[in-house]
């Protein structure tokens, strides 16, 4: 299959930033994975997940036993190739240098990383920048800094992130939407096919998962069920 850049020709709003409705549409089933999250080769899991309906992928190679150096770069290249072959945007977690080296489609950063304002200068206007936010103040700052979307959570308890913030349910997502804040949002943390619906009902544009797909006996089925949740909303 020939490679294609998922964001090439994508709509820019006012000639400057990616159109937010376009970004919103990409977030429906947001799969995050690194090598330590799956029991089978990551490439196999990713291919199956994409076949099931994943709409955007984040390479998150961190935690005990995670790859570093050349091995991390090789895996990132392999997974980016799979994403490109299927037109799925490839986002890099935390590692801006890696994102630039690979010409990734974007980055996702948290509150301990460089602010989106600085990243925008480094990456340019046509890349996706996602920011984790846990409070209304963090949300306002991320929007002011030019984030394209927010990751809000943990919605439910998670065992995929040791330093996760306290579980917050859907309260923040609901209150942002009630205030009329329209930035694209994904909920994250402990989301499965059995509890995804309230996250979407609260106003999230999509759901973001690690284990619900990476640890599933069938990543394809898991991704398809999550995509189907979205349709049932
Ligand atoms: C989509 C999405 N939302 C939130 C996060 C968490 O980012 P962060 O708080 O920086 O934590 P780490 O993932 O870096 O451990 C995310 N990665 N993706
Ligand atoms: C990266 C991250 N950020 C907040 S919770 C979380 C982990 C999500 O993993 P899972 O979907 O397995 O709970
Ligand atoms: Mg981070």
Image: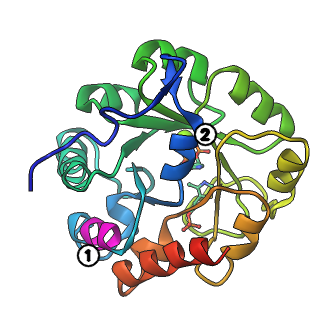
* In the displayed structure image, the side of residue 203 where residue 102 appears, left or right: left
Find the distance from the CA under tag 2 to the CA under tag 1.
30 Å
| Mark 2 lies within 8 Å of ligand 1 (Cβ measured) | yes
Residue lying at 71% horizontally and 28% vertically, measured from the top left: 143
Give how far across and how far down residue 127 sits, in percent: 42, 29
Report which quarter residue 90 is drawn in: top left
Q: Secondary structure at mark 2?
A: strand
Give the main secondary structure, helix, strand or loop, of the magenta stretch. Answer: helix
- Name the residue tied to disc 2: 149
Whichever of callouts 2 and 1 sits on the residue coming sooner in the sequence is: 1
Residue 45 image offset from top left, x and y in percent: 29, 71
State which region is magenta: 45-51
At 62% from the left and 32% from the top, the residue drawn is: 112
Q: Nearer the viewer, residue 151 or 52?
A: 52
Q: Determine if the magenta segment contains residue 222.
A: no
In the picture, which quadrant includes the N terminus? bottom left
If the image is split into quadrants, where does the C terminus sit? bottom right
Residue lying farthest to the top in this orientation? 121
């Amino acid at each position: 299959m020939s490679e294609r850049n998922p964001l090439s020709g994508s709509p820019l709003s006012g000639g400057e930033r990616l159109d937010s409705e376009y970004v919103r549409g990409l977030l429906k089933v947001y799969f995050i994975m690194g090598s330590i999250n799956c029991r089978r080769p990551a490439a196999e899991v990713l291919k199956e997940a994409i076949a099931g309906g994943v709409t955007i992928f984040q390479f998150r190679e961190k935690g005990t036993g995670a790859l570093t150096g050349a091995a991390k770069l090789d895996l990132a290249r392999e997974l980016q190739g799979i994403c490109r072959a299927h037109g799925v945007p490839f986002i890099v977690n935390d590692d801006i240098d890696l994102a630039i080296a690979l010409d990734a489609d974007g980055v996702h950063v948290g509150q301990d990383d460089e602010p989106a304002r600085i990243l925008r200068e480094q990456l340019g206007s046509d890349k996706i920048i996602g920011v984790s936010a846990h409070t209304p103040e963090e949300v306002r700052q991320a929007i002011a800094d030019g984030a394209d979307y927010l990751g809000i959570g943990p919605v439910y308890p998670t065992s995929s992130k040791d330093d996760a913030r306290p579980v917050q349910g859907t309260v923040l997502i609901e209150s942002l939407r009630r205030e009329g804040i329209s930035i694209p949002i994904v909920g994250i943390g402990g989301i499965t096919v059995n509890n995804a619906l309230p996250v979407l009902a609260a106003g999230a544009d999509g759901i973001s998962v690690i284990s619900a797909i990476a640890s599933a006996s069938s990543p394809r089925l898991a991704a398809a069920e999550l995509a189907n949740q979205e349709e049932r909303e």
